[in-house]
Amino acid sequence: MSKHVRHNRITVPQIRDRKGGEKIVCLTAYTAPIASILDPHCDILLVGDTLGMVVHGMDSTVGVTLDMMVLHGQAVMRVSTHALVVVDLPFGAYERSPAQAFKSASKIMRKTGCQAVKIEASEGASDSVAFMVGRGIPVIGHIGLRPQAVHLDGGFKAKGRNQAEREKVIKEAREMEAAGAFAIVVEGLAPDLADEITNIVAVPTIGIGASPACDGQVLVIDDMLGLFDWTPKFVRRYADLRSTIDKVAAQFASDVRSGRFPDSTEVYRLQSAQKA
Ligand code: KIV
């Protein structure tokens, strides 16, 4: 009998069909223990390049490499069985040409087994989306605030402050849809702009710092759990794990220093070897 286990994962067409219907639930996941907890609750697990900041302590996502995405994508895929797993194309891995984007995305998909990739709407990105989709790679587009453009923008800045910016973001949305993206992440937009885009495009929008009217919502798991030391305005903190872990570490340090850890139940009791 084959050892191969078939999972009943949510599929790309199922996500596409959720336009205007049941809201899409998406969280980021980067490690096996967290992915296994989130998997039953989520429609999409996003192995986002935010992992550079929240897991690896980088200032931005710019330093994240393709190999880092593969490593974390593998961890998430190993333990998840339900959610659609999407892995980000990191900075420098797709911008040169559609062929470069295909090469990076196919490496991610082959090495991790994930179902789709996500790409930020940098110049020419829609050509790359069309190229990848035409060759069998499902893609989510990412428009509005683009974390990989942090240096160009001079910070993580919400988009749509003036007419030109609004038109640019709407154009990005239309281009992503026309290129064949099956969903679009809309980040850091005024709610009315996110609503307008949600009404214009026929594929689901997944908001982050955007609007409740989007077809789904995504948050960075570390922000939501209160693990990261800076919380953006749009995040709802459901827990304060940073202070929980701080208290636990302080208690452990005190127990070790005072000799209270380990006690007699926390050591091995081995039978001494029988004498011959
Ligand atoms: O990398 C990421 O985590 C993302 C989310 C912010 C949508 O792209």
Image (spheres, grey):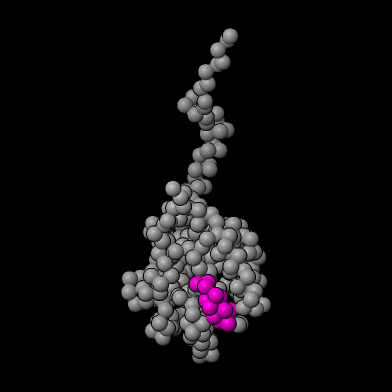
Q: Main secondary structure of the magenta part?
A: helix
Q: Position of residue 7 (x, y in %)?
A: 41, 57
Residue at the farthest top position: 276
Q: Along the line of sight, which residue is nearer the eye, 218 or 256?
A: 218
Left or right, 27 with reference to 104 = left
Q: Which residues are magenta?
A: 126-138
Residue at the farthest front position: 1
Q: Which quadrant of the rendered structure holds the C terminus?
A: top right
Asked where in the image residue 89 lies, by quadrant, the reply is bottom right
Asked where in the image residue 101 lies, by quadrant, the reply is bottom right
Could one spot residue 186 in this view of the protein? no
Image: 87 above or below 36: below
Question: Residue at left 49%, top 80%?
Answer: 180
Q: Position of residue 247 (x, y in %)?
A: 49, 45
Image: 238 above or below 13: above
Question: Residue at left 63%, top 61%?
Answer: 67
Q: Position of residue 33 (x, y in %)?
A: 48, 50
Could one spot residue 68 in this view of the protein? yes
